[in-house]
Image (cartoon, grey):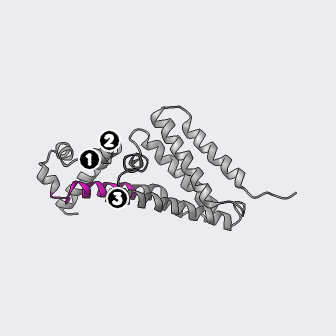
Amino acid sequence: MRKGELTRAAILDVALDAASRDGIEGLTIGLLADKMNMSKSGVFAHFGSREDLQIEVLKLYHHHFEQEVFYPSMKEERGLPRLQSMFALWIKRVTVEIASGCIYISGAAEYDDRQGPIRDELVGMVKAWQGALQRAASQAIQLGHLRQDVDADQIVYEMYGLILALHHDARFLRKPGSVDRAQAGFERMIEYYAPVIAG
């Protein structure tokens, strides 16, 4: 990487850290200039606008999420093993983010009633992840790992609900045992949707 690319990558790393704590709207060129010991014009030279910076931070967060959760899960066997891996790695990532915050979750609160490119980018990323979960759940149904009458969208809804509850209780309420409860909830859900064995 050239010097300019290295500087831009360093700015984005600092911006992602700040956004995880203070939200996407908390990101400013001035804040990053202070943190990087650069001039505002020096930071601005790497991004066309504050909005461009915010979108690039979202893309970097999404990239990390894919590398830590999505791609490793794709190496697992199609169907239930893959779905279980996706949830397990998702929980693992959330436990790390308890100290900082999940941009998907905090971003949803920031942009649920805003319009514009940042919201569109965030919505697209979340929908892409939900789509991946839906495909894994559908494959689990098709392969007989789960009952044929199960609604894959309902599985995704319940998985998301468990993650949101985990994030809320662990980060906001600081309740111990929240990770175990989320894992127990997922296991109970899978057991409920498992095929009925005759006999």
**For mark 3, what is the residue?**
59
Amino acid under disc 1: Leu
Quadrant in which the N terminus appears: bottom left
Estimate the x, y position of residue 36 in percent, counting from the top left: 18, 46
Mark 2: secondary structure = helix
Count residues near mark 2 (Cα–Cα under 10 Å), then give few for <14, some for 14-19, many for 20+: some
Count residues near mark 3 (Cα–Cα under 10 Å), then give few for <14, some for 14-19, many for 20+: some
Amino acid under disc 3: Lys
Residue farthest toward the bottom in the current orientation of the protein? 142
89 left or right of 60 in image: right
**Residue drawn at the location 58% of the way across and 43% of the way down:** 182
Amino acid under disc 2: Asp
Q: Is-magenta flag for residue 178?
A: no
**Residue drawn at the location 51% of the way across and 36% of the way down:** 169
Q: Are marks 2 and 3 in contact (CB under 8 Å)?
A: no
Mark 3: secondary structure = helix
**For mark 1, what is the residue?**
27
**For mark 2, what is the residue?**
22
How far apart in space, not on screen, are marks 1 and 3 (Cα)? 15 Å
Quadrant in which the C terminus appears: bottom right
Q: Which mark is residue 61?
A: none
Mark 1: secondary structure = loop
**Residue drawn at the location 52% of the way across and 41% of the way down:** 166
Along the polypeptide, which appears first: circle 1 or circle 3?
1
State which region is magenta: 45-62
